Amino acid sequence: MDASERDFNLKVVLISFKQCLTDEGEVLLDHYIDSWKGLVRFLNSLGAVFSFISKDVVSKLQIMERLRNSPQSEHYTSLQSMVAYEVSNKLVDIDHRSCRHPNSGCRTVLRLHRALHWLQLFLEGLRTSSENDRTSTLCSDAYNTTLAAYHSWIVRQAVTVAFCALPSRKVFLESMNVGSSEQAVEMLGEALPFIEHVYDISQKLYAEHSLLDLP
Ligand SMILES: CCCCCCCC/C=C\CCCCCCCC(=O)N[C@@H](COP(=O)(O)O)[C@H](O)/C=C/CCCCCCCCCCCCC
């Protein structure tokens, strides 16, 4: 195990959502992308059965990194500047019948934003569950309340199969690499408010610009 693997733990990843937010309530995209990269790393450690999920997230992160490295990068420093730029320059498919901007930043972040809601509910479920609760049930309850409505039948089936491969609650909490299951639960209580804050600000911003249903 090298130093980076030893130092990697889910607390670092979850707390990193705190850095996404400025005092003025802006969501910084570089930190947002980095937080997601940490989550993908954790997902990959759970096994190959989740690789179709991490591939999808990675492809969305690549779109965002391309925008951050493009000549328009200054407009992609925060979620707020991205929304202002893409909306005012008609770079998003507000009209549901058109699909002219499948790689817009707004559409791409919307998919991650919905997944952040799943993460929030799943972590809250994990935090408040008891020893004998099943991780797969917690995970699929959170999925059915959030992402499932946006996924095709085939994706929902694949996801359901993948959930069955999740380890037990105890093993899962210990795999976070933050100590005992009790310490992991405590850490979730510390980190969840940062994720909730990022989610709430993004949700409000997208709702104000009618961007919550981008095709
Ligand atoms: C203490 C526990 C911490 C858990 C940390 C887990 C790490 C989580 C990492 C990633 C979470 C999943 C992110 C899923 C993003 C899905 C984005 C999406 O909705 N994509 C669909 C729509 O995209 P477009 O086609 O419109 O471009 C795409 O069709 C779907 C692709 C398949 C993947 C969808 C799977 C979603 C499952 C969420 C549960 C993940 C289970 C992880 C188990 C811990």
Image (cartoon, helix red, strand yellow):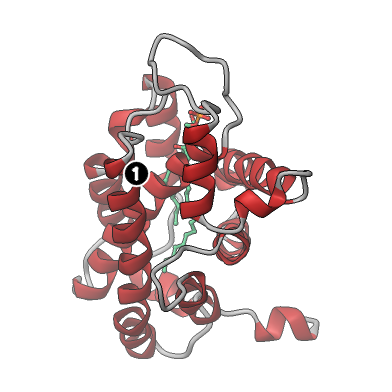
Left or right: residue 70 compared with residue 127: right
What percent of the width, then of the height, locates residue 20?
A: 50, 69
Residue type at mark 1 is: Tyr
What percent of the width, then of the height, locates residue 107?
A: 49, 34
Q: Nearer the viewer, residue 190 or 109?
A: 109
Residue at 62% x, 49% y is 75
Q: From this viewpoint, which residue is outermost toward the top?
A: 97
Circle 1 packing at 10 Å, graded few (<14), some (14-19), many (20+), is many
Residue annotated with mark 1: 206
Residue at 46% x, 53% y is 80
| Secondary-structure class at tag 1 | helix
77 is higher (above) or lower (below) than 140: below
Q: How many marks?
A: 1
Left or right: residue 89 compared with residue 138: right
Residue at 45% x, 40% y is 111
Q: Nearer the viewer, residue 171 or 53?
A: 53
13 is higher (above) or lower (below) than 145: below
Q: Can you say which quadrant of the picture contains the N terminus? A: bottom right
User: Cβ(mark 1) to ligand 1 < 8 Å?
Assistant: no
Q: Can you say which quadrant of the picture contains the C terminus? A: top left
Q: From this viewpoint, which residue is outermost toward the front?
A: 88
6 is higher (above) or lower (below) than 38: below
* Residue 182 visible here: yes
What percent of the width, then of the height, locates residue 137?
A: 26, 52
Q: Nearer the viewer, residue 40 or 139?
A: 40
* Residue 164 visible here: no
What percent of the width, then of the height, locates residue 165?
A: 45, 50
Q: Nearer the viewer, residue 212 or 26?
A: 26
Tell me which corner region of the image, top left, top right, bottom left or bottom right, holds residue 173. Answer: bottom left
Residue at 37% x, 45% y is 114
